[in-house]
Image: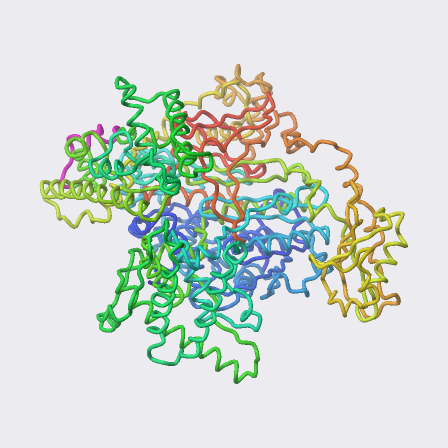
């Protein structure tokens, strides 16, 4: 109860399952300056399982002005150890270790060390060679990596994930009413309502799903050859709904009209789910060691191929509608019972696979299977790109060729990580941004663009060792948020680069 | 010890000399206070009336378990002082609406920062800042969403320029007689049953239907039914007298789930088109008494009938005991007020009671049940809150605070945070809008008066206005009122000889003086009372200039059409003066201010995001929600 109470306000965003994911996660943070401790603060508070900070810096005067998790009495001590201790004070349910150590040594001598983490966050690293080396290792180990760097009022966030699976996107506009492919119990219930009834109360209480169902059936009889509704078909159906009403005051008919577009979308397998079914892990590579996500997806695919007749399990969610309590309850019941039947089928398929793979049935809880059935349409796989790929090429241009402020900052960061040094003759930079010359718009001409980039690169260099607390806190908030999304497999995380411009209060994301 | 930021060229020297007022030490407040102190703001006053609760600890990091129950403002101030001994952080554990925080008090600050969670306090601080003519940075978060904006009199919209949606209300009969949805039963349990049994009793309550917000929407189309309901109230209140008895819970149960339902059933016309409720009988559930010790009802599952009854019995007992403790404390303290318990969503007994009774009522009316977790959200109007969103919003507030203090209005803007959706972009910006011409809060002339309330009469005020008729421009026929109470008009002169004290026109109150017939482009006067007893005249103007229409107002009214929001801001910085300007005109997800809290974001679907008035030379690419995976370079 204690932890339910403590975490109450966030459970309403990511639920028990998300909270368990968070509590099971062990993340590694390289560096312990302000942005590192701020991001950790935002993970310790909601209850991440464990963190490890690795840093060979000691607490200096400069830290006192920017880092909330060191105090004057900590001067000269290991910053990793001090900040770990102070961070842990916020939440006794979290474990943490501070290692006074050079992480590059670990990277070079025992790269396996990193394999145990669920996620690695690299902060304020100015050594682009080490950055690339770490990125390559994480890519190879399939561990999500977040790279972040703040300088003055600017922040840079890069998420590198090879494959990321999402179970709940929390997009709210999905409806699963099966009006185009009613299951038997639904047909039976819906046909009990009479659209032609004279009684005004009865007519005004026909639920909109029933109205749409009957009108659609009628329309299908008139258009037997059509299987997919076009926009004009839906318009026709809407006109039929309008004709069937007694008067314009009937709220249930108003609802039916409003729902025509959404509720009559064909019940098909979403592309994101198909992509999961086509994934090699799902098709043929399930092993004893497979992630439970893929076992669930495989069971789901089996269900779709067999009992589901090409469709996902019924989610069982029914929207609010204008009707009497009785009808609403019976409609809820009919969807709910079908959802329960579908769930039972998926459950037994999950158990079949667990047995076949020689695993314990307890590896996947009933709650998890229920969640999958309820949100099946939201499951998806996101593919990210490798750090080295980004460094080897510049992003695509904008449509009209203008360079905005944040794009210039992006290019400056890009150059920064490629260790392009600004020299007095700027030749290195000139060659570097050559592809942009002709698209530079108002910055056209080598001097214009170089000048802008040089100013920015200077800025990044100049602030490479000093963070502004406010920028660090804000970027720390954003990075932590992305980490929460990644470890809970909920919502859609950033899978590319984001520039945070705190002077103008803008953010821009870049892909390539 | 000194903690100066490492790079003084980027952190200007302005903040340390500025005095800043922060209202609220909750989720945003903790982050903001830390940012301010670490960014060199050395003079901060912090006001918060709240105490620390366990459910705060997932984000309000200045507090720890041992602080539960202590004042937020005090603990927060203490926590950050540790980090900067130079910082003067003054804590006020008090309601910002306390008259001691008057306009002269507000005026000592260069800037006010709101970190509030309710509509009422936001509106109050907004008005105080308008009167004191101090800039205000307003903010709020709800789950992954948040927003920050800047308000300054004459320059921008104020908080009241756009009306905020009012909380949802239900007709009294729906709540009391014909519920049809879970929320109706929850409102009944929380606002009616709980209050009638354990709430405070005042003399007025005996006469007035006391079921809170729902009464507002009462449709009195059925007076006889209302009369019957009123009788029900009284008999329920009488049950309070039996609180000590062992069968108190049973008697309440029999009344509200038995007798009252049976009475409803006698009204056949009510059930002509509705399913008839089925009353419950306590003795039908004999196993309840055995289960009391071993019932472990789950938080996220809907309780069974037995579980509901067990929880009802146990929570009623606990609440009855607590209520009686309060009563006995009061009688020893000699207080005549009859205080009771108030609803608190984080109070386990209260939440058990509301969940159990709401679900039992749902059962009676054939409505689906709700888990305790869901009931908490619905009854408590809970806004999800997380550390990350607060960190980002506090960062934005701090930047806006700097811009204001450096007088860089060109950099000030409204920023929306839209996160956790399919779209990877985080910020949406809008240029600050001009004040609304018809706003009753900022399109008025605030005039401070020093008043000896014992001597000053309403007539003195009228005389003062007439003396300055040429400046005031309100004509001869005046109307005077105070928060909706009419004090004077040409046909109502009864009060003119009465003193301010007699009329309860006391420190901090606002008196509106307007032309009886509204005049175009001439704003009413709103007098702000500062009580003073050592003044020569009973009423003195603090600053006569305040009587005149402000310059900015005449400018606004000269523009027939409101300034379009796309008016380009001046170039952001000198450094980038030659760059193409970016226009911040993307309309984004706005938060609603509902039921006093900033919450319930509008669904973030694609139709809500549109670019308006995008100048042709700016680069704005609007991403498509559906194809978020292949976005181009996006420049906001």
Task: Name the colour scheme.
Answer: rainbow
Q: How many labels does the image show?
A: 0
* Residue A105: quarter of image: top left
Quick one: quadrant of the N terminus of chain A? bottom left
Prevailing secondary structure of the magenta residues: helix
Quick one: quadrant of the C terminus of chain A? top left
Left or right, residue B321 beside residue B483: left
Residue at the limit of the structure toward the bottom, as seen here: B332
Q: Any magenta on residue A78?
A: no
Residue B271, percent from left and from top: 37, 54
* Residue A299: quarter of image: top left
* Residue A314: quarter of image: top left
Frontmost residue, B336 versus B385: B336
Left or right, residue B223 beside residue A196: right
Q: Does residue A83 sit above or below B421 in this rendering?
A: below
Frontmost residue, A6 versus A184: A184
Residue A413, percent from left and from top: 48, 31
Which residue sits at x=39%, y=59%? B267
Residue range corresponding to the magenta coloring: A274-288
Q: Does residue B594 sit above or below A207 in this rendering?
A: below
């Amino acid at each position: 109860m204690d932890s339910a109470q403590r975490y109450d306000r966030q459970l309403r965003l990511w639920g028990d399952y998300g909270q368990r994911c968070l509590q099971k996660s062990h993340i590694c943070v390289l560096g312990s300056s302000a942005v590192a401790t701020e991001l950790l603060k935002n993970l310790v508070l909601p209850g991440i399982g464990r963190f490890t900070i690795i840093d060979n810096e000691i607490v200096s005067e400069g830290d006192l002005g920017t880092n909330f998790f060191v105090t004057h009495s900590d001067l000269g001590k290991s910053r990793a150890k001090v900040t770990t201790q102070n961070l842990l004070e916020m939440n006794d349910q979290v474990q943490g270790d501070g290692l006074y150590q050079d992480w590059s040594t670990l990277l070079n001598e025992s790269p396996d060390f990193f394999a145990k983490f669920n996620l690695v966050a690299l902060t304020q690293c100015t050594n682009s060679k080490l950055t690339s080396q770490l990125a390559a290792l994480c890519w190879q180990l399939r561990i999500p990596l977040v790279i972040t760097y703040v300088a003055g009022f600017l922040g840079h966030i890069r998420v590198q994930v090879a494959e990321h699976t999402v179970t709940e996107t929390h997009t709210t506009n999905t409806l699963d009413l099966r009006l185009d492919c009613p299951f038997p119990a639904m047909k039976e219930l819906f046909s009990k309502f009479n659209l032609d009834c004279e009684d005004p109360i009865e007519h005004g209480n026909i639920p909109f799903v029933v109205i749409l169902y009957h009108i659609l059936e009628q329309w299908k009889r008139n258009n037997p050859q059509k299987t997919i509704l076009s926009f004009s078909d839906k318009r026709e159906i809407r006109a039929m709904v309008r004709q069937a009403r007694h008067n314009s005051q009937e709220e249930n008919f108003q609802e039916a009209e409003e729902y025509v577009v959404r509720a009559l979308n064909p019940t098909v397998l979403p592309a994101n789910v198909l992509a999961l079914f086509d994934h090699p892990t799902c098709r043929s590579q399930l092993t004893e060691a497979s992630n439970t996500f893929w076992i669930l997806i495989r069971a789901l695919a089996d269900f779709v191929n067999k009992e589901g007749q090409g469709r996902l399990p019924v989610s069982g969610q029914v929207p609010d509608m204008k009707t009497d309590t009785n009808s609403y309850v019976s409609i809820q019941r009919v969807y709910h019972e079908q959802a329960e039947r579908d769930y039972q089928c998926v459950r037994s398929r999950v158990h079949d696979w667990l047995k076949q793979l020689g695993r314990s049935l307890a590896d996947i809880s009933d709650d998890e299977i229920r969640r999958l059935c309820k949100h099946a349409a939201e499951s998806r796989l996101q593919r990210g790109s490798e750090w080295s790929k980004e460094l080897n090429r510049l992003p695509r241009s904008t449509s009209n060729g203008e360079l905005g402020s944040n794009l210039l900052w992006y290019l400056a960061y890009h150059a920064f990580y490629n260790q392009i040094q600004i020299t007095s003759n700027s030749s290195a930079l000139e060659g570097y941004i050559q592809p942009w010359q002709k698209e530079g718009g108002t910055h056209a001409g080598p001097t214009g663009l170089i000048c802008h980039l040089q100013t920015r690169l200077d800025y990044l260099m100049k602030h490479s060792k000093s963070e502004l607390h406010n920028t660090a806190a804000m970027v720390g908030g954003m990075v932590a948020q992305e980490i929460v999304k990644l470890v809970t497999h909920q919502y859609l995380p950033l899978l590319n680069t984001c520039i945070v411009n705190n002077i103008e209060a803008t953010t821009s994301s870049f892909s390539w | 010890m000194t903690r100066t930021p490492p790079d003084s060229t980027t952190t200007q020297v302005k903040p340390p000399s500025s005095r800043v007022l922060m209202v609220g030490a909750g989720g945003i407040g903790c982050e903001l206070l830390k940012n301010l102190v670490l960014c060199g703001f050395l003079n901060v006053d912090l006001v918060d009336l709240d105490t620390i609760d366990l459910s705060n600890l997932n984000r309000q990091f200045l507090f720890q378990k041992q602080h539960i129950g202590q004042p937020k403002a005090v603990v927060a101030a203490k926590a950050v002082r540790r980090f900067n001994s130079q910082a003067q952080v003054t804590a006020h554990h008090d309601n910002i609406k306390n008259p001691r925080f008057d306009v002269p008090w507000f005026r000592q600050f260069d800037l006010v920062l709101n970190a509030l969670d309710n509509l009422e306090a936001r509106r109050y601080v907004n008005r105080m800042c308008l009167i004191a003519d101090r800039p205000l940075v307003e903010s709020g978060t709800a789950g992954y969403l948040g927003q920050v904006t800047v308000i300054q009199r004459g320059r921008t919209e104020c908080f009241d320029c756009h009306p905020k949606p009012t909380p949802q209300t239900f007709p009294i009969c729906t709540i009391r007689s014909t519920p049809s949805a879970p929320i109706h039963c929850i409102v009944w349990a929380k606002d009616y049953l709980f209050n009638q049994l354990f709430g405070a009793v005042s003399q007025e309550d005996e006469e007035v239907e006391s079921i809170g917000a729902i009464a507002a929407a009462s449709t009195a189309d059925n007076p006889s039914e209302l009369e019957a309901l009123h009788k029900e109230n009284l008999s329920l209140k009488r049950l309070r007298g039996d609180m000590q008895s062992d069968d108190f819970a049973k008697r309440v149960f029999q009344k509200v789930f038995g007798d009252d339902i049976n009475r409803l059933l006698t009204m056949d016309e009510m059930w002509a088109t509705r399913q008839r409720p089925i009353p419950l009988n306590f003795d039908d559930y004999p196993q309840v008494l055995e289960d009391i010790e071993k019932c472990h009802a789950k938080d996220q599952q809907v309780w069974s009938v037995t579980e509901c009854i067990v929880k009802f019995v146990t929570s009623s007992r606990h609440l009855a005991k607590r209520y009686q403790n309060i009563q006995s404390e009061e009688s020893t303290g000699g207080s005549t007020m009859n205080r009771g318990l108030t609803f608190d969503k984080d109070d386990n007994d209260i939440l058990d009671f509301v969940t159990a009774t709401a679900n039992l009522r749902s059962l009676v009316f054939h409505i689906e049940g709700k888990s305790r977790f869901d009931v908490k959200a619905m009854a408590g109007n809970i806004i999800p809150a997380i550390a990350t969103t607060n960190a980002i919003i506090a960062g934005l507030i701090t930047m806006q605070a700097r811009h204001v203090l450096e007088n860089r209005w060109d950099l000030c803007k409204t920023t929306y945070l839209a996160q956790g959706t399919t779209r990877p972009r985080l910020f949406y910006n809008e240029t600050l809008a001009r004040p609304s011409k018809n706003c009753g809060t900022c399109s008025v002339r605030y005039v401070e008066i020093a008043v000896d309330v014992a001597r000053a009469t309403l007539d003195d005020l009228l005389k003062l206005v007439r003396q300055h008729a040429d400046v005031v421009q309100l004509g001869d026929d005046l109307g005077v009122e105070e928060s909706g109470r009419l004090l004077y008009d040409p046909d109502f002169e009864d009060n003119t000889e009465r003193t301010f004290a007699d009329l309860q026109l006391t420190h901090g109150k606002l008196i509106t003086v307007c032309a009886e017939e509204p005049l175009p482009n001439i704003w009413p006067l709103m007098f702000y009372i500062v009580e003073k007893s050592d003044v020569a005249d009973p009423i003195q103007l603090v600053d006569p200039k305040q009587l005149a229409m402000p310059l900015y107002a005449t400018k606004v009214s000269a523009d027939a059409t409101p300034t379009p929001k796309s008016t380009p801001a001046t170039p952001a910085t000198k450094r980038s003066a030659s760059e193409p300007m970016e226009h911040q005109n993307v309309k984004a997800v706005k938060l609603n201010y509902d039921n006093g809290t900033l919450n319930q974001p509008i669904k973030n679907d694609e139709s809500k995001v549109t670019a308006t008035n995008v100048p042709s030379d700016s680069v704005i690419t609007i991403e498509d929600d559906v194809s978020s995976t292949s976005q181009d370079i996006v420049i906001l």
